[in-house]
Image (cartoon, grey):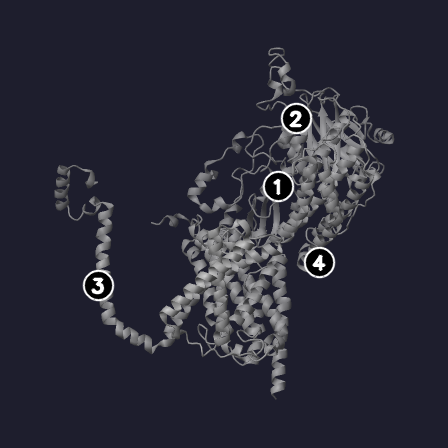
Amino acid sequence: MDRTLKARLEARLSDHLRAPVYQRHDETEIRIEPGSVPEVLRTLHDALDLRFEILADLAGVDTGVAMQVVYHLWSPMTSDWLRVIADGISRDDPRAPSATFLWIGAEWLEREAYDMYGIVFEGNRDLRRIFMPPDYTSFPLRKDFLLPDDAARSPGAGVRHVERAHVSAGAADPAAGIRRAPAS
Amino acid sequence: MSAATPAGGRIRSAMGLMRSFPAQFWSRLSLQERLALIFVPAAIVAGVVTVLAVVLLGPPFLDFLGANLPLVRFAVAATAILLLTVPTAFVLIYLELKVIARMNLRIGPNRVGPWGIAMSVIHGFKVLSKEDFAPTGADITVFTLAPVVTYMASVMTLLVIPFAPGLIGQDLNIGLLYFFSMGGLTVVGLLMAGWSSFNKYSLLGGLRSAAQIISYEIPLTLSVVGVIILAGTMSMNRIVLAQSGSLLDWFVFKQPLAALIFFIAATAEANRTPFDMTEADSEIVAGFATEYSGMRFGFFFFAEYVNVFIVSALVATVFFGGWTAPFQWPWAYNLNWFNPWSFGFFGWLAIVLTVGYFGTIFFAVFARLFGGREWGLWASMGLGFLFLLVVVAGLVVLAGFIAFDWVAGLVWFMAKTYAFVITFVWMRATLPRVRVDQLMGFAWKWLLPASLLNLFVTATAVVLLNR
Amino acid sequence: MPAHQHAPRTSPARATTRAARPHPQPSADDASARQYSSADDPRVMLDRQVGALFEPIPPYPTRTEREGEFYSLGDGEMFLNVGPHHPATHGVLRLVLKLSGEQIVDVDPVLGYLHRGVEKICENSDYYHVIDQVDPLEYVSSLFQEWAAVLSFEKLMDVQVPRRAEYIRVLSGELLRIASHTLFMGFLALDLGGLTPILYSFIERDEIVEMLAALTGARMLFNYFRVGGVNGDLNHEFMSRLGDWMTRAAKQTEAQAGLLNENEIFVRRMRGVGVLDRATALRYGVTGGNLRASGVPFDLRRAHPYSVYPELDFNIPTRDEGDSLARYLIRVDEVRESIKIVDQCLHNMPDGPVMARLPRLIRPRPGRAWGACEGPRGMLGVYTISDGSDGPFRFRIHDPSFLNLETVPALLPGNLLADTMAVVSSLDPVMGGIDK
C-alpha cells in the first residue's frame, strides 16, 4: 500500500475524483466520471511523479445498476497497481471516451468491452465486434443476459447452485431480477 | 421393365416394339440386353479386325520395325523408364520417411510389412483410392493436364541418364541440353496447376515456382558448361567415359565450384528444402498442389521424388563419374566357366527346392530367435523365406557384379545416386526454408556470378594449357 | 453441356477486382442495414459469380471506417485469407491479408473462432470451479492462468499462503515456463520450415509435463493451484523425475538452442523482421518477452513482485533490437534463468503445510481485487469483483497474447507473406487465451 501515491493522486486529480482514493493490499483505486477519462489518463501517463505508462488491462463491468470501464495501470514510480474506475455509465446507452489516444493497444480491449457489454467507446476507429459473429445482436456479459442454468433465475434468486438444494422453493421472489453488485 | 410384365403385356409390348422400331427399341431393353448388344458385336468386330491386321499388316510392320531399330529401342526405353519411375518413387518415399524419422528421433513407419517397407505402396494405394475432385471454378482441362505435364517432364529426363555401360535410354549427342530443356518443362506443369486451381495459394505457389525454377536454370546450366568444355561433348555417356579411370578423374575435383553451384541449383530445381518455396506448407498451404487430390496429387507427389532421383543421378553422372568405379578392381575374375545351362531343368529344380527348403528353415530359425515371441511360426517362416530371397538376390548381384560390366556399373551408379538422395533427405530434415526474396537474391547475386567466374576460369585454363 | 462449363473462366487475380466496389456505409441506427440484401446473399452470389465466394469480403455492410478502408482493394492488390484452417496459424486464428504480389499491405486479424465465454461461465461458477474453467485458456501453460486467478482471490480473502506452497507454485510455474518456451522454439522453427526442432522440443516438454503429471495428476490442464495453496505436496515420483531432468536440463537447452541459433537461414529470416520499437510496444500494451525484446525490462516477477520471487536470484534478460530474432533469443535466455530458479527452489524449499486453513465454502467479503502474474507470454491478470456470494460477480481475464497479437497489423505491412509466420510465431500467441 503506497500512501504517497494517494497524496500524489489527490494533488493531481482532485477535480476529477468522484470518491476518495481507496487503497487495499497493493492496489490503489480511484473513481472518476466517464467524461474525465481522457484528461485523467493523460495526467496519469504524463505526470513525472506518476508515469503510469503500462496499461495492464481495460475491462467493462456491468454492476447491474450502471456500467463501468475499469483501467488497471502500472508505473515504475510506485509499488501499487492503480485501478481507475470510470463509473456511472448508463446501462441503456453506454458511452465512454476511448483510451486509444494514449494506448493504441486499448483498441482491441475496447472492442472486447463493446462486444461483451455494448459500451460504445467514442474515438475508437475500429469499434466492431471482436469475438461474437457480426450479426449477433446481444451483449453476453451483461447481467441481464441470463444463461439457461443461471442461478439468478432459480427460485432462490441470487443463491448459487452449490447451495440451491438448501433453499426451499418459493422462499424468494422468482422475479427477483438480475444480480447487482454491492454498493462500494 | 419387360421382364416384370405378364405374358400378354409382353406380347403387346413386342408388337409395339415391332411397330415403333427403332425409336422405342433401345429404351425397352434391360441393362444386360443393352450391354450384350453393345459388347458382343464389338468383340466380334475387334477380333476380326485384329486377325486381319496381323495377317495383312504384320509382316510389313515387322519389316518396318527391323528397319527402324532405334525407334523400337526408343519405345522400349521410354516404356521401361516410365515403369521404373514408380518403384523409384516408392523407394525414395520410404527412404525419406524412415531417414527423417531417425533424424527426428522417431521410429518412422513400422506397421505395414516388416520395418514398414510397404508404407509407400500403401501411400500409392491411398492416393489411388481417394476421391479425385476439381474445385468449383477450376479450369478442368488445364487442371487435369498439369500433373501429367509435370510427371512426363520428370520421366522424360531419365531417358538420357546413363545407368550403366550400354544401359541408357537414348545416348543423345546433346544429352545435357535435352536434360535441361526437359527439366525446364516441369515449371510449365506447376504453373498450369497453380493457375487452373482457382485458388490464391495455388497461384502464389505456381508463380513462385516459375520465378524460382527459371532463375535457378541459369546457374544450373552455366555451371556445367565448364564440364562440357573439359569433356568436349554434351553426350552423357561420353561425359561419364571422360571421367573413367580413377577417383581423381572425376569432374568434381576439376570443377569443385561448379559442382557446388550445380548441387545448390539442383536443389532449387527439384523444389527441395531449403528451397521448397513452391509448396511451403507453413506459408502457402501446399502451393500449386493445394486443390489436388487423389491420383492427380499422386502424380505431383511421384514427380517430386522422381525429380530428386534424377537430380541426384545427374550430380553423380556429371561430377562424380557416373557408373565408373572409383578404382580398378584388383581381383577381376572370370566366371565364364560357369554355364547355367549345364544343369538342365531338373537340376535347377532340385537346386531351387533344396536351397529354398533348407534356406527358409535356416533363416526362420534366426527370425524366431531374434524376433522373439511376437513372430508366430508361420510368420517367422515367411520372414525366413524373405531373408533367403534377399540373400540369394545379393549373391546373384554379387555374381553379376564380378562377371558383368553393366551390373558393376549399375551398382556404382546407384550407390552414388542414393548417396545424394540421402543428402537431400538430410537437408530436408535439418534446414529451415529460406524466404522467397533471399532465394532469388542468392541465385542472381551469388550463384550466377560464381558460375560465370567458373566458366571464365575453366575456358582460360583450357585455352592456356592447350596452346 | 458439361457441368463445369457453368463455372466462369476467371482467374483468381481477376476475381479480386470485383472487391473494389465500395461497400455501402452503415447508417447509425438503421437496423435494416444489418439485413443481407439479396444482392449480397451468398446464395445469390453462388449463382451469379463463383469467384466472389472465395473472397473474404464480409457479406454485410462495413461497420467502421477502418473496416471499410481495409475491405476495399487498391490497384493490383488482393486478399489472402490465412486461416482459420491453415498449417501455420496457432490454433484457429484467421488473418485476412491484403497483398500486393507477395508483399503485405494490410492485415485484419479475425478472432473469436475459439470463443467460449469463459468469463460468463466463471461468473456463474463458484470460486473452486473458476480455477478449473480458466485452465484451458492458455493451454500451453495453464498453471499461470490459475495463478493469476488465485492471486486475485487470495487478495479478496486476505489469505496468507504458506511458504512451502509458494515455493511449489514457483517451482511448477517455472518448469512450465521452460516447457512453454521450449515448445515455442520448436513451433517457430516449424513455421519457418524446419522439421526437426519441434520433435526435440516435444521430448523436452514431455519430460516436464510428465513430471508435472506426477505432481498434479494431469498433463495439460493441471487444476493444481488452490485459493490458499496448492492441491498436494511434492511427491517422490515428481522429485525423482525432476532430479533426473535437472542433471541434463542446461546441456539439453544449449543443444536445442544451438540447433537454431547457429543456423544461418534461420537467423537471416528472423533478423530485422517485424521490428517492434520500445515506444510502440508500450503503446500497444505488449508484455512479456515481446516487450523485453524491445528494451523494456518489465517483468512482473521483478516489476511487481509476488509470491517468493523477491527471495530468488535471477536476471531479467532484455534486448534492444525488438525484431523476431530478439524475441526468440529472449525466450532462450529466459529458459536459462528459469533453470536457475528451479535449482534455487529445490535448495530453498521450506517445510510446512501446502494449504492455508480455509473454510470449505469460499465466500469473500464484497470487494474488488486485481491479481497478475508473469506468464511465459506476458502478464496474465485477473480482476475479480465479489458480491459476497461464493462465486465472482465479475471475473475479468486479461490474456497477454491478446495484446501481443494486436501488434500484428502494425508489424506485418511491408513484409513478405513468408514473414507472416515468422512474426506471428515469434509473438507466440495462444488462441485459447486470446479468444477466451
Residue where numbered disc 3 is placed:
B48
Task: Estimate how packed mark 3 is, as few (under 14), some (14 to 19) or many (20 or more) residues with alpha carbons within 10 Å.
Answer: few
User: Which one is closest to the eye, mark 3 or mark 1?
Assistant: 3
Which kind of residue does numbered mark 2 sit on? Glu
Secondary structure beneath dot 3 equals helix
Secondary structure under tag 2 reads: helix
Q: Which residue is mark 2?
A: C123
Kindly report the distance in space between the C-alpha atoms of the residues bearing marks 4 and 1: 42 Å
Q: Is the residue at mark 3 from the same chain as the one at mark 1?
A: no
Do pointers 4 and 1 mark residues of a single chain? yes
Residue C412 visible in the displayed image: no
Q: Nearer the viewer, mark 2 or mark 4?
A: 4
Q: Amino acid at mark 1?
A: Arg
Residue that mark 1 sits on: C66
The percent coordinates of residue B346 (x first, y second) are: 36, 68
Q: Is residue A101 above or below residue B245?
A: above
| Mark 1 burial class by Cα count in 10 Å: few <14, some 14-19, many 20+ | some
The numbered mark at residue C262 is: 4
**Circle 4: is it few (<14), some (14-19), or many (20+) Cα within 10 Å?**
few
